[in-house]
Amino acid sequence: MSLVAGSYERFIWGFKLKALKHSHESLTLTPLFCFPSHISPIKSVAVAGSAAASGGADDTIKLYDLSASAEIGSLTEHSASVTALSFFAPPPLSAPRNLISASDDGAVSVYDADPFVHLKTIRPHKKGINDLSVHPSGKLALTVGRDSCLAMVNLVRGRRSFYCRLRKEASIVKFDLGGDKFFMVMDEKVSLHESEDARLVFELDNQRRVLCAAPGTNGLLFTGGEDRGIKAWDTTSGKVAHSIEDAHSARVKGIVVLAGSDAAAGDGDPYMVASASSDGVIRVWDIRTTSKEKPNPLAEACTKSRLTCLAGSSLKYWKHKKKENDK
């Protein structure tokens, strides 16, 4: 599987997670590429299959081919910092069908991903967008912005279909893997809502500010932030199922859930999680070892950069790619 991280120093980092001696017990993060792809800090990254994208404070989206470890182009439709990116890849396709981006002027842009062509720009917010999440169906997206509002964008018709004011500005919004529920982060609070009517199910209290979140299978939600740890919340009970205290020596800025082959097929829990911190360290963890006092990471890489975001593609894709190459 691959990991892509962006940094404040304008650098994009690519890594491939490899198993040593044909065992997941021993892993290594092998560098794929590293270069200054933007002229300003990188705000967001996204990965789907061999495609990757990064959005920067230079109002530009850069595109990459991970199989070739190369930059392949730029998208320049935005007129403000690109704050969020998301690929839509309908199963069983490994390649993305669309790229959806959001910017600091309240705009959402939709692109065809084969080839990359701009289709539509929508303005669901009056101020900058903090985050976006695309529904698993690919028909709609949720956005939260600095106007303290939640918006729903109809990606089929290319227009805003819902808009409401929140009690507080939300920094993160994420659908769960099934799309039946979604999460919003407001400082140290994480709220779980029904997707159908946005009804609040319950609220999680992380004590410290949450800076990143990623949904897992079987109702798990992984969070990281200013407490420098990683928590896996059981969203059916609202309690912490797993926790890695002091996973990093600095704030956790990105989390990616790395599902095993059985979890990628929909069975079992994901057992590997990658995290990135603001001091430039990327680590891969086995959540089954979190009961230990000081669990050791399965793999680690130090970029010596101030990392701002992290994204990854699944093991399932790389196994499928290897089979194609072996034919």
Image (cartoon, helix red, strand yellow):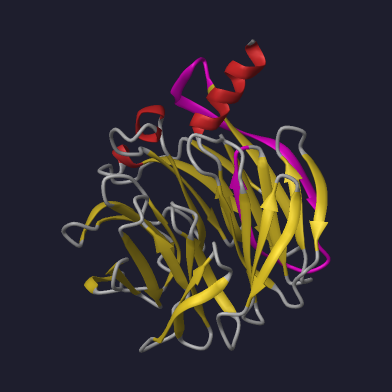
Q: As drawn, which residue projects farthest toward the front?
A: 157
Q: Quadrant of the C terminus?
A: top right
What residue occupies the far left of the structure in this picture? 237
Residue 218: % across, % down = 26, 45
Q: Position of residue 307 (x, y in %)?
A: 63, 59
Q: How many marks?
A: 0
Residue at the spot x=28%, y=34% of the render? 268
Q: Which residues are magenta?
A: 20-49
Quarter location, residue 120? bottom right
Q: Position of residue 53 (x, y in %)?
A: 69, 53
Q: Nearer the viewer, residue 186 or 274?
A: 186
- Does the stretch in magenta take in 40? yes
Q: Position of residue 21 (x, y in %)?
A: 51, 15
Q: Who is closer to the viewer here, 210 or 58?
A: 58
Q: Say whether residue 233 is left or right of residue 317.
A: left
Q: Is residue 25 above or below residue 240?
A: above
Q: Is residue 261 left or right of residue 104?
A: left
Tell me: residue 74, above or below residue 299: below
Q: Is residue 175 left or right of residue 78?
A: left
Would residue 189 appear left or right of 38 to someone viewing this image? Answer: left
The residue at the point 39 percent across, 72 percent down is 185
Q: Is residue 304 visible?
A: no
Can residue 234 be seen by looking at this rendering? Answer: yes
What residue is drawn where x is 66% and y is 82%? Answer: 105
Q: Quadrant of residue 56?
A: bottom right
Assign the N terminus to one quadrant of the image.
top right
Residue 114 is a magenta residue: no
